[in-house]
Amino acid sequence: MKKTYIVAAIMVVAAIVLLINVAGESSAYSNFEDAARNGGKVKIAGQLAKDREMHYNPEKDPNYFTFYLTDSKGEQRKVVLLREKPQDFEMSEQLVLTGRMKDGEFVATDMLMKCPSKYKDEEIYIKSEKENS
């Protein structure tokens, strides 16, 4: 067999393995109930419960931050983020957390924040101006 056929076959196998891994990582958002039932790694989208306490003590442990999140079904749970507290965290509109449930808490290893757009006020102004016309 020619070397080019062997190299091509190895590349095809590698591409298939890569696609399987990517497909396994891209999952739909879950909620706390599903995360507790599943027991595995999930992504949860929700909003920060701004009326509940947040705890971050960088002198003691800079990679330990706790807060409360309200999921898509309205359930609130304590979240332990195993990273530092992000800048402007309180201003976030939506959070997407990757992690798993452990002892009634959601332990997150990654987080994405959706922050307010700097054009939001401008968009509201344009809409209200059109309504007055």
Image: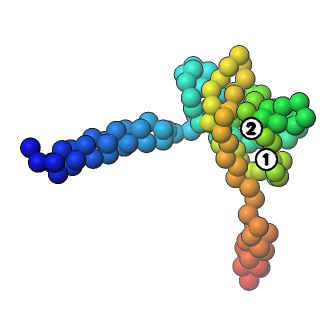
Q: Is residue 72 visible?
A: no
At 84% from the left edge and 31% from the top edge, which residue is drawn? Answer: 61
Which amino acid type is shown beneath numbered disc 2?
Arg
Instruction: Examine the image and state in which quarter residue 102 appears.
Output: top right
**Marks 2 & 1, CB-CB < 8 Å contact:** yes
Residue appearing at x 77%, y 73% in the figure: 122
Name the quadrant of the N terminus. top left
Q: Quadrant of residue 42?
A: top right
Q: Is residue 132 above or below residue 107?
A: below
Judge left or right: residue 108 versus residue 23: right
Identity of the residue furthest to the front in this view: 3
Q: Could you say which is closer to the camera, residue 106 or residue 130?
A: 106
Q: Is residue 17 above or below residue 2?
A: above
Residue topped by disc 2: 83
Viewer can see residue 61: yes
Q: Which residue is mark 1?
A: 86
From the top left corner, tell me how far across and down residue 5 is, in percent. Answer: 15, 48
Residue 27 placed where, x, y %?
49, 38
Q: Residue at x 74, y 70 (%)?
A: 119
Type of amino acid at the residue the image marks with label 1:
Pro
Give whichever of 30, 84 is nearer the camera: 84
Residue neighbourhood size for the residue with mark 1, other residues' Cα within 10 Å, grouped as few (<14), some (14–19), many (≥20): few
- In the rendered image, the vertical position of residue 61 relative to residue 48, given as above or below: above
